[in-house]
Amino acid sequence: MFPFTSLSFTTRSPTSPDQETTITLEDAELQVALQYSETDGLKPLVDWLYGLQELNHDRKTGEGWRITPGCGSQDLIYKAVQCMVNPGDAVLVESPVYGGVIPMFASLHCEQIEVETDAHGIRSSSLRKILEGWAKGKPKPKVLYTVPPQYGCNPTGMTATTDRRKEVIELAREHNFIILEDDPYFYVYYGEAPRHPSYFQLELEEPEVGRVVRFDSVSKILSAGIRIGFASGPTVILNAIDQLTSTSNLQVPSLTQVMIYRLLSSWGYDGFAAHVKRVAEFYKAKRDVFERGMRKHLTGLAEWDSPEAGMFFWFKLLLTDDADLSHQGDSEDVIRTRAFENGVLAVPGTAFIPNGGKTPYVRASFSLIGEDEIDTALQRIRDAILQERAARKAAVV
């Protein structure tokens, strides 16, 4: 009694963008797409993703891990947290961190222990100090959340080095916690250096595997609205996520799974690689335009490291002429008030601090706006900084 009788969609070629192909679902495929399916995912799609993880992370089946899809990686992260963390638990969270997870832990009244980061990723010395100084009798954290340990961290854009990652994995084994590796920008890498191996790959070098749950997404490379991500990790944890899915939303929609599978299988792994390369080059060009604008308008008024992936700049506002750059104040009022009134929407850094607090940093996205708009926006941010500087000088006088 379903009213849909056929479905077809047109896609661009991954190697020749001007060439388009129409994909039509056969009757049997349409029947699958319109019905309920397995909670643990459509088997042809999941099998394709196993091959993808072997190509990119050198992980093979039979190593005690499996894959499960979700309605975007956010859905899977939320379910992993619900499965692994009890109300009131202490959790390790890199700082700054993706703002979307802060409410997850807050809703469970967790103690969010902030682990310091820098341009090279999580500072393992900070993590070690936290764990070795842990109060006796107090349960240690079960999880460390990091986004991403690979490339293009949201919000900072940092790239964690291989040595740092290895040290974190060693600490995970030594202090018995799971690494939640959220890596939605893995396929939007446009740096020149070879890729660093992921936590998911690096744990193969350890005496045991099973310390990493990895979250991938197709939102940034195929479609955000199609809502498909996938988790890879220890079977026992993935089974728990599936049990939660079966009692909440039953499954990832069959229709979008079938559509994505038909697209990916028509491309093959080489075609997929060509597509994500083109996506990365697109964002690299936008990054370069944004950074030229920053050099033009914000030199001497802000500091930043150029991101190698993703679609964000994380920059520090220099709100005073104080030579001590550690006393640059807070970006909150400048961004939410002065910049917003000037017609610019950016996110003050405090939104990415797990426990809140002042910070001079700001996150700005360069994914949607064009070159003229970028120039205008950065000019307006410059004006906002200068207004704040003038107000501070007047207050001192």
Image: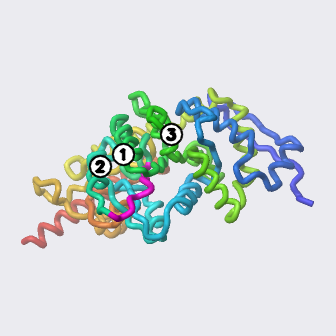
Tell which residue pokes out farthest to the right in this image. Answer: 1
Residues shaded magenta: 137-147
C-alpha span from label 2 to label 3: 21 Å
C-alpha span from label 1 to label 2: 7 Å
Q: Is residue 89 left or right of residue 348?
A: right
Counting from the top left corner in percent of width and height, residue 127 is at 31, 50
Q: Residues within 10 Å of mark 3 (few under 14, many from 20)?
A: some
* Cβ atoms under marks 1 and 2 closer than 8 Å: yes
Image quadrant where residue 138 sits: bottom left
Vertical relation: 304 (above or below) 59: below
Badge 3 marks a residue whose secondary structure is loop
Quadrant assignment for the N terminus = bottom right
Badge 1 marks a residue whose secondary structure is helix
Counting from the top left corner in percent of width and height, residue 375 is at 36, 49
In the rendering, which numbered label is found on residue 171? 1
What's the residue type where badge 2 is placed? Arg
- Could you tell which of marks 1 and 2 lies nearer the N-terminus? 2
In the rendering, which numbered label is found on residue 45? none
Inspect this view and state whether residue 374 appears. no
What's the residue type where badge 3 is placed? Val
Q: Nearer the viewer, residue 159 or 274?
A: 159
Which residue is at a point 40% across and 58% down the rendered structure image? 141
Q: Is residue 211 left or right of residue 359?
A: right
In the rendering, which numbered label is found on residue 209? 3
Q: Is residue 68 left or right of residue 179?
A: right
Counting from the top left corner in percent of width and height, residue 383 is at 27, 59
Residue 174 counted in the magenta span:
no
Check disc 2 and report the residue beneath it. Answer: 128
